[in-house]
Amino acid sequence: MKEQQTKGGAQATALDILKKIIDGFLAGALISIGGAVFLACSGEWSGTLAPVGKYVGAVFFCTALLCICIKGFSLYTGKIGYVLEKHSKEDLSVMLLGLLGNFIGTVACGYLLAAAIPSLKETALTLCNGKLQSQAWWQTLVRAFFCGILVFLAVDIYRNHKTPLGVVFCIPAFILSGYEHSIADMFYFAASGIASGEALLFIWLVILGNSLGGLMIPALKLVGAKKPAVPHSEPAPRASESSPAVPSAAPLSQAEEPASDDENTPAE
């Protein structure tokens, strides 16, 4: 009997872990779809129309985060901001296993889409080489930090106000500003075919920046939160210290009784 319970508990744990990874995988797949749209628009619209393609791609990238929010999939950059509010073992496992799923989903989709649409690979290669060659480490960290702020706001506005406006405005804002999103970058590097130690360090640096940015607003709100003042109540006096007891009032006589309800109630 005990062995059956142990096996049942182990199976439940394994299924729970698998579900968390799958939720992260699905979020990573959706981010890959958004990233592919951005790469397609950036690559196809060249010359004087190149900025237009970037704007269109940034707007349609919102499709990814909107679907993630609606379906409740596990995106690391959307969950890290709540780790101060909810930091139980279960919450941390959801976040970290979700990050693993994000990685698997973006890498798998990145290689698959690059093979199916070669033009995406060329655009991704140009984009990722620029990230590695033209950005100092601290610039990458700062860009990731501000991205983390905007992604937290997008998710938090949707979560608390049930409106997609945060997603629709905050997501294009971080893309057009050149900020770095770790999960999207996982897809871009996978699609580009770049698999190096430098690329891995770049991704970890972006994860760190996204985490710090996502935690900034919740942390400052906790610091600035005022604890309600506890009213100070005076101790009740002892029986010996209290004033002499006042004799209770005698019952009202019939003449002193209040008028009945029928006499005081106005006519309707």
Image (cartoon, rainbow, N blue to C red):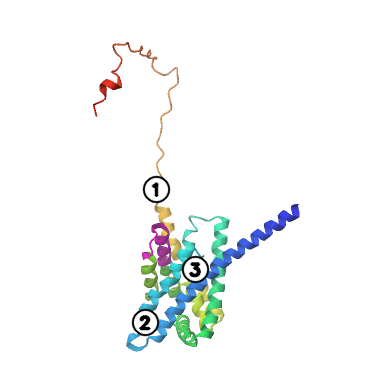
167 over 91 or under it: above or below? below
Q: Residue at x 47, y 67 (%)?
A: 68
Residue count near mark 1 (Cα–Cα under 10 Å), binned few <14, some 14–19, many ≥20 = few
Name the spot of residue 235 as percent of width and height, x first: 43, 28
Q: Which residues are magenta?
A: 149-165
Q: Is residue 135 left or right of residue 26?
A: left
Q: Residues within 10 Å of mark 2 (few under 14, many from 20)?
A: many
136 over 97 or under it: above or below: below
Q: Is residue 163 magenta?
A: yes
Task: Name the residue rendered at 37%, 78% in the picture.
Answer: 56
- Specify whether residue 262 is in view: yes
Around disc 3, counting alpha carbons within 10 Å, would you say few (fewer than 14), some (14 to 19), or many (20 or more)? some
Looking at the image, is mark 1 or mark 2 earlier in the sequence?
A: 2
The residue under label 1 is 226
Numbered circle sitting on residue 257: none
Look at label 1 and name its amino acid: Lys
Mark 3 → mark 1, Cα distance in angstroms: 29 Å
Disc 2 target residue: 53
Q: Mark 2: which amino acid? A: Gly
The residue indicated by pointer 3 is 208
Q: Is residue 6 left or right of residue 80?
A: right
Residues marked 1 and 2 touching at CB (< 8 Å):
no
Q: Is residue 135 visible?
A: no
Query: Does the magenta stretch mainly form a helix, a strand or a loop?
Result: helix
Which x, y percent locates residue 151?
Answer: 42, 66
Q: Amino acid at mark 3?
A: Leu
Q: Of tags 1 and 2, which is closer to the observer? A: 2
CA gap, disc 2 to disc 3?
30 Å
What secondary structure is marked by label 2?
A: helix
